[in-house]
């Protein structure tokens, strides 16, 4: 990652000054490890909230005096009924004091830091197209930019304005600053009104750090949607610096987070440039029109080999290139004695040039049966019955045993849908990324049926190898063909029909050459799998080393 060191030397130096115990090489590793910049952000925030990011100033008013004054003021407001009454904070136990407090700091609980007002449980009948937006968790997290609106009169405490701090305590656990129009707060989100104890922006960072701690603790519940209950949230112990130091911390944190933004943007640009480089070099190799051109392009790939193959997705790109070379007749030597045993269909369907002994045919001409749709009755209420595959069993492009559901149908009906070893399966509906993905069933005969969203095909074995056809269906041109022919949108599951599958053009070599292509592809895909595993292990090692470096910096 030398380019990273050169391009981001300023940002690297500034960020390294935060943790001088981390040496340059280790810092580069942290910054480029998977989720490395996120780890740096977490480290910056953790150091800030422990008083290790800026110096303490003895002239600052100690935070314990500020805490006492804030509590008196809030008790007065609660006694007057101006704000909601909360249970007083319990004393902090020795076990809760996670680190030694810097001079002038004080321990307290989140309940001391602000008012936390929960949003309203709006019903669909409350939704409309006019009025203020209802701010939901998916609006905060960026998963959904669309708003439901309501013209309902609500208590002012749940009205959200620009600059308000919001804490989502279910599904997405995080703190946010609202920057949109005036809105109304939905349930599972707190609107935060800071106490006099805290600078508003410091409270925002304090809550982000506290939410991270709670999310990693036993207080985070839920298998499907993680959430933190109000009681443990308000009781969480936090360390508060003097008000003047809070403001210094905010300035430093925001400066360093800005450098992390630059670092993240640079890493993202590197990833994009890497992907373009791989695509350009590998695509040029596939598009070579002569042995001389192909040799020159291979040389270009070889000269960048270490740079190209330094991450798992590079192995994916290499594997796809192997598939494309295979179906163009560029992977194994051809034999002049080999010829076709079948008549080709329309050459107007050709997608790219193929060797002279090859022919373009429609899929229908090489099939013994199919494509036929499967059957998907309701799942059995008990774990007995006929096993029917789920889409997950074939989404990776190969058969994965163990992904099925039980269906309650008789063996007489199931017999029509039982799979035989060697059956070719193709998904007729899924997200656009996966629609048309194919796999060969390698399980036992009559062990599984297949669902309605999968088609089954059986080939003419004297004409085409099912494994060669599988290679073609996984290659980029075939994948693009199905995606282009899919009907529907991403929201309502794109689909292809039997006519589309039967009509896809297939580049057909002589059957003996097909077998040699299959053997060579399987050998090279095995090498790609080993390479991918090695690169994944290397990434995992970098991630572990980054975590160790963070732990050492915090020790």
Image: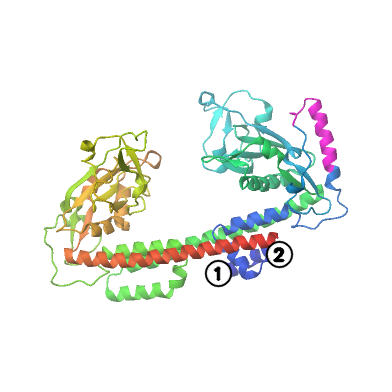
Q: Could you say where residue 45 lies in the image, as x and y percent from the top left?
A: 68, 53
Name the image quarter holding the C terminus: bottom right
Q: Residues within 10 Å of mark 1 (few under 14, many from 20)?
A: few
Q: In the picture provided, is 274 more to the left or to the right than 175?
A: left
Residue corresponding to mark 1? 3
Q: Is residue 72 magenta?
A: yes
Question: Which secondary structure lies at badge 1?
Answer: helix
Q: In the picture provided, is 335 more to the left or to the right than 481?
A: left
Q: In the picture provided, is 279 more to the left or to the right than 117?
A: left
Q: In the picture provided, is 291 more to the left or to the right than 303?
A: left
Q: Could you say where residue 427 lies in the image, as x and y percent from the top left?
A: 31, 46
Place residue 183 in its image quadrant.
top right
Q: Residues within 10 Å of mark 2 (few under 14, many from 20)?
A: few
**Front in this rendered view, residue 408 or 291:** 408
Q: Is residue 364 magenta?
A: no
The vertical placement of 292 against 18, above or below, is below
Place residue 330 in its image quadrant.
bottom left
Q: Residue at x 77, y 49 (%)?
A: 246
**Front in this rendered view, residue 130 or 522:** 522
Place residue 35 in its image quadrant.
bottom right
**Front in this rendered view, residue 331 or 213:** 213
Residue corresponding to mark 2? 17
Q: Could you say where residue 451 lies in the image, as x and y percent from the top left?
A: 30, 41
Q: Could you say where residue 178 lies in the image, as x and y percent from the top left?
A: 64, 40
**Residue 530 visible in image:** yes
Q: Earlier in the sequence, mark 1 or mark 2?
A: 1
Q: Main secondary structure of the magenta part?
A: helix
Task: Mark 1 and mark 2 in contact? Answer it, CB < 8 Å.
Answer: no
**Front in this rendered view, residue 80 or 488:** 80
Q: Which residues are magenta?
A: 66-86
């Amino acid at each position: 990652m030398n380019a990273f060191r050169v391009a981001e030397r300023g940002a690297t130096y500034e960020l390294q000054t935060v943790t001088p115990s981390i040496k340059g090489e280790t810092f580069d590793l942290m910054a480029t490890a998977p989720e490395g910049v996120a780890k740096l952000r977490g480290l910056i925030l953790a150091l800030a909230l422990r008083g290790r990011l800026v110096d303490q100033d003895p002239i600052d008013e100690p935070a314990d005096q500020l805490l006492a004054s804030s509590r008196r003021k809030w008790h007065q407001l609660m006694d007057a009924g101006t704000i909601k009454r909360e249970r007083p904070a319990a004393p902090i136990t020795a076990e809760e004091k996670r680190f030694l407090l810097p001079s002038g700091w004080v321990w307290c609980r989140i309940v001391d830091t602000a008012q936390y007002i929960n949003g309203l449980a709006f019903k669909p009948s409350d939704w409309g197209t006019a009025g203020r937006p209802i701010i939901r968790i998916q609006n905060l997290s960026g998963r959904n930019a669309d708003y439901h609106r309501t013209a309902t009169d609500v208590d002012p405490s749940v009205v959200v304005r620009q600059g308000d701090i919001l804490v989502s305590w279910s599904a997405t656990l995080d703190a946010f600053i609202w920057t949109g129009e005036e809105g109304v707060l939905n349930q599972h989100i707190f609107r935060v009104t800071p106490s006099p104890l805290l600078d508003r922006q410091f409270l925002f960072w304090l809550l982000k750090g506290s939410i991270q701690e709670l999310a990693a603790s036993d207080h985070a519940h839920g298998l499907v949607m993680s959430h933190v209950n109000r009681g443990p949230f308000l009781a969480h112990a936090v360390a508060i610096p003097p008000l003047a130091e809070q403001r210094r911390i905010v300035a430093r944190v925001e400066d360093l987070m800005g450098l992390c933004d630059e670092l993240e943007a640079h890493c993202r640009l590197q990833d994009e440039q890497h992907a373009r480089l791989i695509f350009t070099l590998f695509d040029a190799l596939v598009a070579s029109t002569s042995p001389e051109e192909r040799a020159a392009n291979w040389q270009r790939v070889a000269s960048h080999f270490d740079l190209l193959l330094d991450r798992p997705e590079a192995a994916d790109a290499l594997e796809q290139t192997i598939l494309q070379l295979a179906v163009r007749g560029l992977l194994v030597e051809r034999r002049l004695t080999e010829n076709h045993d079948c008549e080709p269909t329309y050459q107007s369907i050709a997608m790219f040039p193929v060797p002279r002994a090859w022919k373009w045919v429609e899929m229908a001409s090489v099939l013994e049966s199919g494509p036929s749709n499967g059957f998907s009755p309701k799942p059995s209420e008990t774990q007995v019955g006929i096993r029917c595959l789920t889409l997950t069993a074939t989404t990776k492009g190969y058969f994965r045993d163990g992904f099925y559901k039980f269906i309650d149908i008789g063996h007489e009906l199931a017999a029509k849908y039982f799979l035989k070893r060697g059956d070719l399966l193709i998904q007729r509906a899924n997200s656009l990324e996966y629609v048309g993905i194919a796999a060969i069933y390698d399980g036992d005969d009559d062990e599984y049926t297949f669902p309605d969203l999968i088609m089954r095909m059986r080939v003419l074995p004297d004409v085409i190898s099912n494994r060669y056809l599988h290679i073609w269906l996984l290659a980029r041109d075939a994948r693009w063909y199905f995606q282009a022919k899919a009907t529907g949108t991403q929201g309502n599951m794109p689909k292809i029909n039997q006519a589309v599958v039967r009509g896809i053009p297939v580049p057909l070599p002589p059957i003996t050459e097909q077998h040699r292509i299959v053997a060579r592809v399987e050998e090279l895909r095995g090498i790609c799998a080993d390479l991918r595993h090695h690169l994944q292990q290397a990434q995992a090692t970098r991630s572990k080393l980054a975590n160790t470096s963070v732990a050492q910096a915090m020790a």
